[in-house]
Amino acid sequence: MAMQDIVKIHENDNVAVALRPLAKGETMGKAGAEVCLREDIPQGHKFALRPIKAGEEVVKYGFRIGYAKEDIEAGAWVHVHNVKTALGDVLTYDYNPQENDVAPTEHAYFEGYRRPDGKAGIRNEIWIIPTVGCVNSIAKALESQARQLVGGNVEDVIAFPHPYGCSQMGDDQENTRKVLADMIHHPNAGGVLVLGLGCENSNIPVLMDYIGAYDEDRVKFLQCQDVEDEMETAMGLLKELAAYAGAFSREKIDASELIIGMKCGGSDGLSGITANPVVGAFSDLLVSKGGTTILTEVPEMFGAETLLMNRCATPELFEKTVDLINNFKNYFTSHNQTIYENPSPGNKKGGISTLEDKSLGCTQKSGSALVRGVLEYGEPVKVKGLNLLSAPGNDLVASTALAVSGAHIVLFTTGRGTPFASPVPTVKISSNSRLAGHKDNWIDFNAGRMVEDMTKEELAEELLNYVLSVASGRKVKSEEAGFHDMAIFKQGVTL
């Protein structure tokens, strides 16, 4: 397949997308449907395939992405200057179920760690989890001092500083406690040191109710106020954890046990054409092998939510998805914020004009499988297949939310690039080849090849093999750089 100049995504679209920078005066389109460009069109941006009247729907992905603000001539650039969102506020929805689900395919395997509780992990790391921001610096100091324990089957020692755990109330405090408990149970950690201060709201005795049953060899606790030299005491505990974790080794595990989170950020006009559809095809592939994927960032479902609702496997899941969407809209309006002011300056520069444009591109990551689970923030995955998770669009917060719900790996598509990581290996997938070449130290997988010489299906198969290699121990670029981020969703007041 030769490099294309433009793409009309759906037969009903009245705009096409430039796959390279196009010049004013160039003629685009097939014989009998040619359009002469009236201005330069940047890569990833849209132009009108026919005249669009003021007030008429602008259609991309086969769906409305907004209304024309003015008459738009054929060949004209279509963007924020002449398109406005068509979205309203909290809506009511009808359930029109889609029947087709992905068919099962043959088994695939990875080399992972089998935990005593039956879970599978893909890393064997020691995690230092502070209960409160006051001990962050101690956690980071311990991380560097405990580097000496890395070796054999102990793959890394990682501290996860965060600013919360005290001066919080209500749901906010609940979120912090749920996230910390989920992190403590994550199977990518072979050993966990929970580092408390002693006087915080979410202190270790309080957290115990959220943690529930745990393996005393795998999880150790230290309240810094209780001991004379917290560094010395903590190092003793970390040595015990390293001895315990070091006894695990990789073994063959069925890919049906993999849980993969899906997220996008720094999107451009090609994200919804290359990277997100490739991740969607990957999601269908993993689900066909009995595995699990999780889609989040609810504000980037606004405008495309009915597509996900109609793919819910049951009426109960449909109702949960309606609540997922409307609760998030109410969260925005309760803070006196407009629901639809989402595309960032970088998104707009990359060719995304409205939230519908962004959402229809974003939801391509979900593929075509039926929705089998809908999760609250901080709720662990229970059902295999495609799950939807309540979390905001913020890259660090949403990727952390995927990890705490059980994702072993996060697939992160981007058109502009980002170096961040999450608590689990975070695979950066570029929507265009220019980014893959320009930021080779950030990008793990180039989906931009879809408009050059590869099909979506070929790239999805390659991405599955890459993910299985990461699950078997191959490090992603952010891991090689030593990056690990954790961000907890903050909604309420700070005392």
Image (cartoon, rainbow, N blue to C red):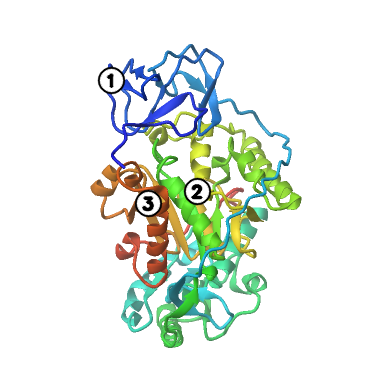
Q: Residues within 10 Å of mark 3 (few under 14, many from 20)?
A: many
The tag earlier along the polypeptide, 3 or 2, is 2
Under mark 2, the amino acid is: Lys
* Numbered label attached to residue 429: 3
Under mark 1, the amino acid is: Glu
Tell me: residue 94, above or below residue 136: above
Q: Is residue 244 left or right of residue 374?
A: left
Q: CA distance from mark 3 to mark 2?
A: 12 Å
- Say if residue 170 shows up in the picture: yes
Q: Quadrant of the N terminus?
A: top left
* Numbered label attached to residue 365: 2
Front-lying residue, 101 or 95: 101
Residue contact between numbered discs 1 and 3, judged by CB atoms under 8 Å: no
The tag earlier along the polypeptide, 1 or 2, is 1
Question: Helix, strand or loop at disc 2?
Answer: helix
Q: Residues within 10 Å of mark 2 (few under 14, many from 20)?
A: many
